[in-house]
Amino acid sequence: MRLDFNAQVMTRHDVVAGHLERLAIDPQTRKLLGLVVHCGEHIGYDVVLPLYFLVSASADLIQLHISEERMDRLPGPTEGSENALSGMRVPHIRELPAPIGWPAHYAFTFPEALTHSTLPEGTIELTNSTTVHTRDGMIGTVAGVEVEKDGTIELLVVRIGTVHRRDVLVPIAWVQHLNAIEIELSRSSDEVRGVG
């Protein structure tokens, strides 16, 4: 299954519930633990989808076997992202933008107690801004992954180029180091360009 960032996520009733925003990965086993889906428009909210909710996936569409009501009850990626009084999802305070007029160099942070992750400890979240580096420098960004049903990542989809962008499929075995900010490959940029 290919999972690309910004792919539409549809419920079993063919209702668009949101789009794929992040991929939660265990850096040790290099397995996909879940999908972080952004629901709603504008501010919206995020939910964590376990892999067993997926029916099928392609580059631009992810089909689920759950309803939109069930999806609204899923936990967010941070503790406190659900309003327990009304049962409705509301954005966690960290998901809201900083107040207008704040200088950009001030960080908008809250005490650590408000931001515990609901994902397993050590999980990293890949985004479409995670850069990919080869032995001779940066080559592109992560566009998605190809996974088995059990979450085993087989290929990394890397978007390369600046003007004429294209996706190349890189074997996960080529990944030397992996974190949320960057992925280092053990190959040269010529080898990476040659696989796609």
Image (tube, grey):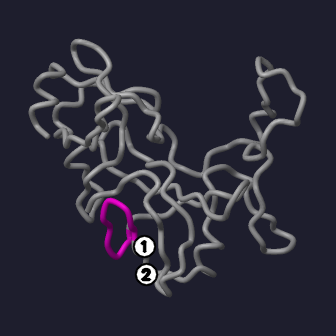
Q: Going by the picture, which residue comes out furthest to the front?
A: 163
- Give percent across and percent down for residue 6: 47, 54
Query: In the visual, does 194 lie left or right of 16?
Result: left
Instruction: Please state the horizontal and vertical placement of residue 122, each as a whole percent of the image.
Output: 48, 37
Range of magenta residues: 52-62
Amino acid type, residue under disc 1 in the picture: Phe
- Which residue is disc 1 drawn over? 53
**Amino acid type at image mark 2:** His
Q: Quadrant of the N terminus?
A: bottom left
**Marks 1/2: CA distance?**
6 Å
**Furthest residue toward bottom:** 13
Residue underneath mark 2: 65
The tag earlier along the polypeptide, 1 or 2, is 1
126 sits to left or right of 168: right
SS category of the residue bearing label 1: helix
Identify the image quadrant of residue 26.
top left
Residue 95 picture location, percent across and down: 73, 46
